[in-house]
Image (tube, rainbow, N blue to C red):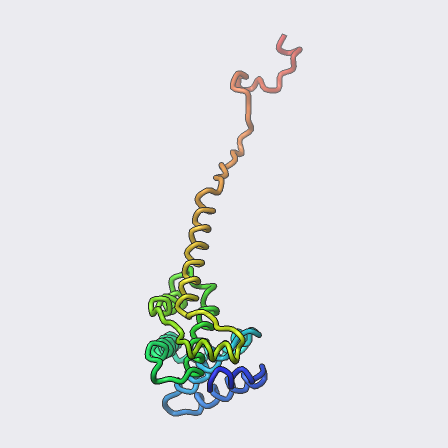
Amino acid sequence: MTYHQLALKDLDEMNELVTSKIKEAKKARSGKIVPLKEALQAVFSRPNEDGMVGKVYSPLVTELDRLDSLEKVYRDLTEEALNALKNTKNFKPDVQVTYSIFLENLVAEFKPSAAEEGLEKRIIEKIAQASVELTKDALKERKRRLMKEGESPSVLAEHALKAAAEKKALQKTTVDISPKVEAKSDKPVTDPSVKPGKEFETDENSK
């Protein structure tokens, strides 16, 4: 499905899509990953102005993780989208936009974890390094249907990595300059000029 077809689906319909693909995967004797992969691609290819992506994709992640295939599926789908945007002659403008939205949503969802070493950062780095650009036809398609042209997914990925690096540097600086608290001694502070045992003598006794 293209991005504008997916945009017509509401929360219930997207949840139904996810649920049906999970059931299909569980019934399959082989190729269980395929329906889950298709569903994940569809979810992330839907325009996300309403925050729908974060509400519906978690069950797919759970199933793919259970099959030990989550990272591979993310890598494969990312590679597919990047290849499509690099070889645009084989894809119509609406398909190009669908792939670009998939990558945009991926960057947006993974951005909070971009400062940590892990799958999310590796995926964002891959998108950034691809340096993909949207064609004029794709930009026109976006503007016509979504009322905005949008940025290249690679540029968005670069911004995410830069923000993550700045955040990490700020956290390190905060730790380095935080004041050190000296351990307090349990021993009472006494005047070194007073001899031991004489601390509590009255003036009259000392005469």
Does residue 62 lie above or below 167 as drawn? Answer: below
Q: Nearer the viewer, residue 12 or 96?
A: 96
Q: Work out which quarter of the rendered image holds the C terminus and state it.
A: top right
Q: Residue at x 45, y 76 (%)?
A: 139
Does residue 70 lie above or below 116 as drawn? Answer: below
Q: Quadrant of residue 92?
A: bottom left
Q: Residue at x 59, y 19 (%)?
A: 199
Q: Residue 70 placed where, x, y %?
A: 40, 76
Q: Residue 159 placed where, x, y %?
A: 43, 62
Q: Residue at x 55, y 76 (%)?
A: 52
Q: Quadrant of residue 164?
A: bottom left
- Residue 69 in view (yes/no): no
Q: Residue 91 placed where, x, y %?
A: 37, 84
Is residue 11 shown left or right of residue 87?
A: right
Q: Nearer the viewer, residue 107 or 33?
A: 107
Does residue 175 lie above or below 165 as drawn? Answer: above
- Residue 159 in view (yes/no): yes
Q: Residue 117 placed where, x, y %?
A: 38, 62
Q: Residue furthest right?
A: 204
Q: Residue at x 33, y 67 (%)?
A: 129
Q: Nearer the viewer, residue 194 or 21?
A: 21
Is residue 42 shown left or right of residue 190?
A: left
Does residue 125 lie above or below 2 as drawn? Answer: above
Q: How many marks?
A: 0
